[in-house]
């Protein structure tokens, strides 16, 4: 992130001190500034625990999907439930992903059970 900011600043400074900017140069600068804003927003988002858990859960499932065995992600997510017994937002994120995994692996009864637990825990 810091390197991107430095690169964008250097590019901006180099462009301002060089010959008159071409339209392509200005487009590139605008793109870099846009990427910088998106990067900053992403970092702000990841600093929130719920968002960090969401991205971690998605990453775990994605890795298992790429390996061709989504079901192997289930025990990991169940362990996360044990790690966060009192954080309902985190538990909801995990339970909804478990619901998806159960449904996608042909375990409809377990998928429904996860939704029932979500409803019960959020009363």
Image (spheres, helix red, strand yellow):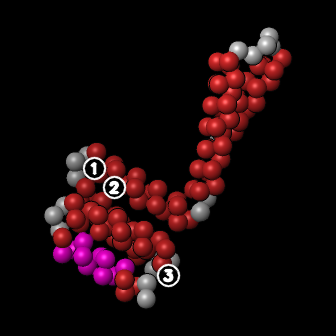
Magenta residue check for 116: yes
Mark earlier in primary sequence (2, 3): 2
Q: Residue at x 34, y 55 (%)?
A: 61
- Magenta span: chief secondary structure: helix
- Up/down of 65 relative to 110, above or below: above
Determine the image quadrant of residue 37: top right
Looking at the rendered structure, which numbered label has been put on residue 65? Answer: 1
- Residue positioned most to the right: 17
- Up/down of 4 relative to 16, above or below: below
Magenta residue check for 60: no
Of 107 and 12, the residue lying toward us: 12
* Crowd rating for badge 1 (residues with CA inside 10 Å; few <14, some 14–19, many 20+): some
- The magenta stretch spans which residues? 109-118
* Secondary structure category for the residue under label 2: helix
Please say whether residue 75 is visible from this viewpoint.
no
Query: CB of mark 2 within 8 Å of CB of mark 1?
Result: yes
Looking at the rendered structure, which numbered label has been put on residue 86? Answer: 3
* Secondary structure category for the residue under label 1: helix
- Up/down of 63 relative to 99, above or below: above
- Spot occupied by residue 25 in the image (x, y as percentages of width and height): 68, 19
Determine the image quadrant of residue 76: bottom left
Query: Whole-Å distance between the Cαs marked 2 and 1?
Result: 6 Å
* Crowd rating for badge 3 (residues with CA inside 10 Å; few <14, some 14–19, many 20+): few
* Secondary structure category for the residue under label 3: loop
User: How many numbered callouts?
Assistant: 3
Quadrant where the image shows the C terminus = bottom left
The residue indicated by pointer 2 is: 61
Q: Residue at x 67, y 31 (%)?
A: 30
- Spot occupied by residue 26 in the image (x, y as percentages of width and height): 69, 23
Quadrant where the image shows the N terminus = top right
Mark earlier in primary sequence (3, 1): 1
Of 72 and 110, the residue lying toward us: 110
């Amino acid at each position: 992130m810091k390197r991107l900011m430095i690169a964008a600043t250097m590019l901006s400074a180099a462009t301002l001190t060089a010959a008159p900017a071409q339209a392509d140069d200005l487009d590139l600068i605008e793109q870099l500034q846009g990427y910088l804003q998106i990067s900053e927003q992403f970092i702000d988002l990841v600093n929130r625990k719920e968002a960090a858990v969401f991205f971690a859960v998605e990453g775990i499932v994605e890795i298992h999907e790429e390996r061709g065995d989504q079901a192997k992600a289930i025990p990991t997510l169940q362990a996360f439930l044990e790690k966060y017994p009192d954080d309902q937002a985190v538990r909801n994120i995990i339970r909804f992903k478990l619901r998806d995994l159960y449904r996608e692996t042909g375990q409809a009864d377990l998928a429904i059970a996860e939704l029932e637990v979500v409803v019960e825990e959020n009363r």
